[in-house]
Amino acid sequence: MLHRIERRDNLAALAAIPDRSVPLIYIDPPFNTGRAQRRTTLVTRRDPAGDRIGFGGHRYTSAASGSIAYPDTHDDYLAFLGPRLREGHRVLAADGSFYLHLDYRESHYAKVLMDDIFGRDRFMNQIVWAYDYGGRSRRRWPAKHDVILFYVKDPAAYVFDTGAVDREPYMAPGLVTAAKVARGKLPTDVWWHTIVSPTGREKTGYPTQKPVGVLRRIVAASSRPGDLVLDYFAGSGTTGAAALELGRRFHLVDSHPDAVATMVRRFAAVPGLTVSGTAD
Ligand SMILES: C[S@@+](CC[C@H](N)C(=O)[O-])C[C@H]1O[C@@H](n2cnc3c(N)ncnc32)[C@H](O)[C@@H]1O
């Protein structure tokens, strides 16, 4: 296999991947599972013919008084994410790296979960991807960043090639030598990068598409040429685009037909591409 697009629920796709076989994983899960939850309310009253003995030794009956639907809570979100993170950890190579891209509202809950799965000492960075686009609240500081949690399987042996990473201009070029200004500086854990321009060439039309510049940096630093890069919440396939540019192989999984159609369009001309999966 050179490059692969797979339409499947990622839990099933991951189950088919051998242990410790993938050098780099990046995922950008949806903010929530998108499922409305329904909860039924029970009303209990005293009833001599009731089927339950309760408070004061009296008999009671319970009846459903109705149900309420409410949007997904973070508990449900972590229940969805947990098994998928555990599977990601299982398939990650012994010297592999895992990048988890999250909304700032969920990242701290997911960090605790990741510490549990990987071990706290496997946590390398919280990368802040800062952008500058869209409306500005006047009621609080406008939120203009995402969080990317970076973990490794083994802190004593992992791939990290800073020499392959694009460099940035110094903030105060007057304070460093001309040679340093010319070379630029190594990025820190705060990455300023514009979002995918709504009118630019990179745009695929997929709503949650991330910029290839962010993925390029991750792939360049945390994998070797020829390595396999896995994204099992692949969306428009941005991880694949970065992998391809940098001479890596990709495996992209998404359960949504629109995502798969977008990726097939994006990579139509790529030699050695396999597309598999099932219709709903
Ligand atoms: C935020 S988007 C990813 C966007 C992507 N990083 C990009 O640059 O285009 C999350 C994706 O996860 C997919 N997804 C959600 N649940 C999934 C599941 N259980 N299995 C596979 N894909 C899933 C959605 O269909 C969606 O395309």
Image (cartoon, helix red, strand yellow):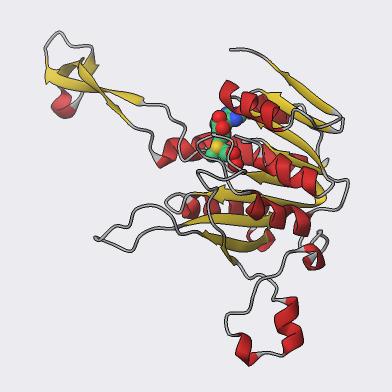
Q: Is residue 115 above or below residue 80?
A: below
Q: Position of residue 274 (x, y in %)?
A: 80, 24
Please indicate whether residue 156 sits to the left or right of residue 187 in the image: right
Res. 113 in view:
no
Mark count: 0
Q: Position of residue 69 (x, y in %)?
A: 29, 25
**Farthest-out residue, top:** 49
Q: Position of residue 140 (x, y in %)?
A: 28, 62
Give the residue drawn at x 70%, y 82%: 181
Res. 253 in view:
yes
Q: Nearer the viewer, residue 207 or 278?
A: 207
Q: Is residue 113 above or below residue 181?
A: above
Q: Quadrant of residue 133?
A: bottom left
Q: Nearer the viewer, residue 39 or 47?
A: 39
Please indicate whether residue 276 sits to the left or right of residue 141 in the image: right
Q: Quadrant of residue 172?
A: bottom right
Give the residue drawn at x 73%, y 88%: 178
Q: Position of residue 111 (x, y in %)?
A: 54, 54
Q: Is residue 189 above or below residue 6?
A: below
Q: Nearer the viewer, residue 140 or 166?
A: 166
Q: Nearer the viewer, residue 128 or 105?
A: 128
**Quadrant location of the N terminus?**
top right
The quarter of the picture showing ligand 1: top right
Give the residue drawn at x 42%, y 27%: 35
**Quadrant location of the C terminus?**
top right
Please indicate whether residue 229 sits to the left or right of residue 1 in the image: left
